[in-house]
Each structure stands twice: as structure tokens, then as C-alpha cells.
Image: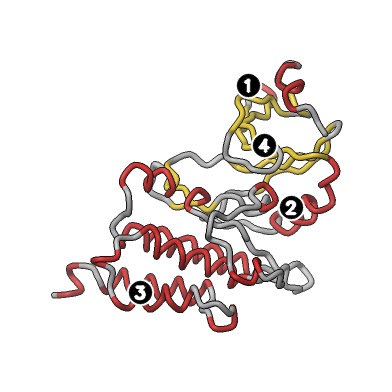
């Protein structure tokens, strides 16, 4: 097992990265806020996920798929490598407030705020789920670990999904995991849809939620994946609900 403490004590360097501070948001291995320096004062801040080198095969396989993604709503995977006894994955640093932090501060949020965030994430997931390689083969990308802590609202109000490509860092979804995972069955993009449906149910204030949104939540969280909507269908339904609920739409 790699001694993370000794790395931090030894000049705070890991391969070409300078480790700035450890992050708590990780259940397997360790995560650090880090910077990759370059010429003439260039710096690129990243989140560096580190795990024992014994996990390199699974980490690399997931990272290879995530490297195909390029979407404005998805935090990008930047680098993968092996250094000494560890394998590391560098992810784009996303600044802002996570949906989890907002919930801890305010409790359940107005349904429109949660629906807008989930709508944006569903659009990103629809893209990821449908991504193919250069030969047209479906890559089979899923997030697999969606929770309020993986959704960040940036200062510009843009919503970003983090963690795509490092699902191994969070084995426990804190109740957002799809039933097929607990049954030991294969998962596809509809497992992510289940997590988004649970998020809508848990995070939004139910008293003012429109019935059409409650129906969407029920459809997204059905026990069997074949009975759920897709991420693309969820995005379309949420966009319509948000559009039709505007004050001017009721006039």
C-alpha cells in the first residue's frame, strides 16, 4: 500500500504535480487539490485522485472511456499515470457550490432550482451515454456514482457534473444506487437516471412540485431499468416542465 503521508512530506510532489492540499471527498485512495506547473509561470489546477497501483487496470479502463468525453457540463479527465506505488487520475477542478452543500445549508430546495440542475446534468449524461468511438462502437459510459456532491453550481450559475471517470473513488452511493447494482446485475445509463430521480425526490420541496414532475420521478426510479426513461427523455421532460411553469407561460 502506498504511503500518501510520505509523499506529502517529501516536497509535496507527485510525478509532475505539486500537491496543494488533501481533499476529504474520496472513499477509496486519496484525493488532492494539485497544480501542474509549466514554463513562464504557467499553472493548471486539478483534482488528483490517487489509488494503489494494484487498481491500475480498472482505473485505466474507466479513464480510457471518459477520455472520449468533451461536454460543457462535464468536468474533464485530463491525465492518467503511474508513479511509484500508485496510479493517479487528474480531473479538471470545478469551482462553486455543490448541490450537497446547498442542501446542508438550506435544507430542501425549491423544485425549480433542483429540476434545473438535474435537467442540465441529464443533458450531459445523454451525451455521455450515447458516446461512440471512432469506429462507431458504443463506449458504454455511465457515471455510476451520481449524488448531490457530484453536481456543482459554478459562480456563473453553470451546472457541472464531476466524477465521470473515477467512479472507483466512491463505492457507496449513499442511497442513490440503482436496484440492479445491489442485485449484482449489469448496469447501463438507466442506473444514472435512477440516481437523478432519487435526487429530485430527496432534494426538492414536494409541496409545490407539479404532478408531471412527480410522475417523472416515479418513472425514473422504477425497480427495473427497462421501465425507466432515458437521460435524454428526462432532460426533455424537465425542460418542458421548467418552461411551462414560468410566470409568463401561465398568462
Element under disc 4: strand
The residue indicated by pointer 2 is 63
- Quarter occupied by the C terminus: bottom left
Q: Which mark is residue 80?
A: none
The residue indicated by pointer 3 is 214
Mark 3 or mark 1, earlier in chain: 1
Q: Residue furthest bottom?
A: 227
Tell me the distance, in whole angstroms, between the alpha carbons under discs 1 and 2: 29 Å
Q: Toward the viewer: 72 or 77?
A: 77
Tell me the distance, in whole angstroms, between the alpha carbons under discs 2 and 4: 13 Å
Tell me the distance, in whole angstroms, between the alpha carbons under discs 3 and 1: 52 Å
Element under disc 1: helix
Q: Which mark is residue 48?
A: 4
Tell me the distance, in whole angstroms, between the alpha carbons under discs 4 and 1: 20 Å
List x then y, in percent, for residue 140. Answer: 70, 69
Q: Are marks 3 and 2 in contact (CB under 8 Å)?
A: no
Give the vertical position of 83 relative to 248 (above or below): above
Give the vertical position of 186 relative to 149 (above or below): below
Judge the density around disc 4: few (<14), some (14-19), many (≥20) Cα neighbours within 10 Å.
Answer: many
Q: Are marks 4 and 3 in contact (CB under 8 Å)?
A: no
- The residue drawn where x is 68% and y is 29% is 36
Mark 2 or mark 4, earlier in chain: 4
- The residue drawn where x is 54% and y is 83% is 227
Tell me the distance, in whole angstroms, between the alpha carbons under discs 3 and 2: 35 Å
- The residue drawn where x is 40% and y is 60% is 202
Q: Are marks 4 and 1 in contact (CB under 8 Å)?
A: no
Q: Which numbered disc, 4 or 1, marks the residue closer to the eye?
A: 4
Mark 4 or mark 1, earlier in chain: 1
Q: Are marks 1 and 2 in contact (CB under 8 Å)?
A: no
Q: Which mark is residue 41?
A: 1
- Residue 40 lies in what quarter of the image? top right
Amino acid at each position: 500500500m502506498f504511503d500518501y503521508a510520505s509523499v506529502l512530506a517529501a516536497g509535496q510532489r507527485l510525478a509532475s504535480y505539486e500537491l496543494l492540499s488533501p481533499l476529504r471527498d474520496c472513499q477509496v485512495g486519496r484525493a488532492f487539490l494539485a497544480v501542474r506547473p509549466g514554463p513562464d509561470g504557467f499553472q493548471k489546477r486539478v483534482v488528483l485522485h490517487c489509488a494503489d497501483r494494484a487498481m491500475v487496470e480498472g482505473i485505466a479502463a474507466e479513464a480510457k472511456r471518459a477520455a472520449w468525453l468533451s461536454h460543457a457540463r462535464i468536468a474533464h479527465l485530463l491525465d492518467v499515470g503511474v508513479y511509484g506505488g500508485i496510479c493517479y487520475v487528474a480531473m479538471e477542478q470545478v469551482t462553486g457550490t455543490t448541490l450537497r452543500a446547498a442542501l446542508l445549508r438550506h435544507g430542501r430546495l425549491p423544485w425549480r432550482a433542483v429540476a434545473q440542475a438535474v435537467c442540465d446534468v441529464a443533458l450531459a449524461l445523454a451525451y455521455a451515454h450515447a458516446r461512440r468511438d471512432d469506429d462507431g462502437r458504443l463506449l458504454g459510459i455511465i457515471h455510476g456514482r451520481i449524488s448531490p456532491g457530484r453536481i456543482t453550481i459554478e459562480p456563473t450559475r453553470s451546472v457541472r457534473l464531476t466524477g465521470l471517470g473515477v467512479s472507483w473513488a466512491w463505492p457507496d452511493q449513499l442511497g442513490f444506487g440503482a436496484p440492479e447494482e445491489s442485485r449484482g446485475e449489469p448496469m447501463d445509463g438507466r442506473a444514472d437516471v435512477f440516481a437523478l430521480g432519487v435526487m429530485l425526490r430527496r432534494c426538492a420541496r414536494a409541496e409545490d412540485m407539479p404532478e408531471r414532475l412527480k410522475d417523472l420521478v416515479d418513472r425514473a426510479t422504477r425497480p427495473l431499468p427497462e421501465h425507466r426513461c432515458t437521460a435524454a427523455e428526462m432532460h426533455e421532460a424537465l425542460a418542458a416542465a421548467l418552461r411551462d411553469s414560468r410566470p409568463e407561460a401561465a398568462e
